[in-house]
Amino acid sequence: MVCESWKAQLDKYLDGELSPDEVRAFDAHVRSCSACSTDALSRVQVKRAIHVAGKRFTPSAEFRRRVHGSITGKPKRTLRLGWMFAVASMAVLAIAAFLFTYVGGRSGREQVYSEIADLHVATLASSAPVDVVSTDRHTVKPWFQGKIPFSFDLPELQNSGFVLLGGRMAYVEQTPGAQLIYDIRKHHISVFVFQERSLPTRLQGNSRSSKELSFNLETWSQSGLRYFVIGDANAADIDSLAKLFKAE
């Protein structure tokens, strides 16, 4: 089949392993091929379901007690040896705490970026990418009232080259937010807006890209809200759309 070559790249596309040119080609194909768009959407849903399921297990108090007992319950040969072990354990715990804070925070941040990319891909693959279809910001903005626990402003696009296609609800680990879809030179860009304090991971400062993604991405915090602008458009277009939102 003609689509077999595309389907062979689908997992790489979803995992952000394709080059920017390959991503643009794949995006164009997904928007015109119902079979590939359905396949892409189902895989994104499975990926998100696995991610949620992976967080359901939390060690019980009994399990923690047994592990703690197995570590501390063994008799020490001498006081000196026990003291040395205690010092070594403290050093290991200090290093582990540092690594958990640094690596854990970093992986949490990258996980949020990955979720945002998945939402963008799901939108591209969907036969109904927006819930409210309109190029008028005064129609799209009121649609979100009562659906999300915050409000936000949409920028004026006159002479900018961007076209608003509409909006839809978006969720990151059950945190509700808004997704706006824009078009520029046949490239779709998603703008996500969430309450900063409601996100599962605290994101520090601003960022213009993530090396783990095939898309260009810019994110920043403003007035208690966290914005993400993501798409396969070039970095200059992503930055231009971000500046329009920042000016509001």
Image: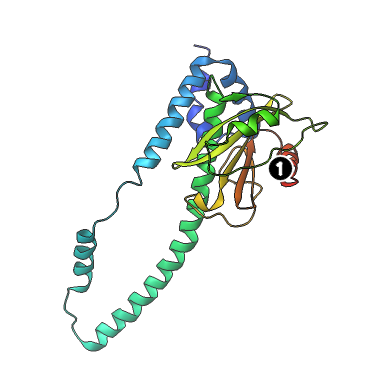
Label 1 Cα crowd, 10 Å radius (few <14 / some 14-19 / many 20+): some
Along the line of sight, the residue nearer the viewer: 63 or 174: 174
Along the line of sight, the residue nearer the viewer: 69 or 159: 159
Whether residue 16 is visible, yes or no, is no
Q: Is residue 25 above or below residue 111?
A: above
Residue 74 located left or right of residue 137: left
Q: Find residue 155 and report its image quarter.
A: top right
Q: Give how far across and how far down residue 243 sits, in percent.
A: 74, 44
Whether residue 101 is visible, yes or no, is yes
State the residue position of label 1.
245
Count all numbered tags in the image, as a single digit. 1
Q: Is residue 92 above or below residue 55?
A: below
Along the line of sight, the residue nearer the viewer: 224 or 53: 224
Q: Give how far across and how far down residue 114 sits, in percent.
A: 51, 42
Q: Give how far across and how far down residue 193 sits, in percent.
A: 59, 42
Residue 202 located left or right of residue 43: right
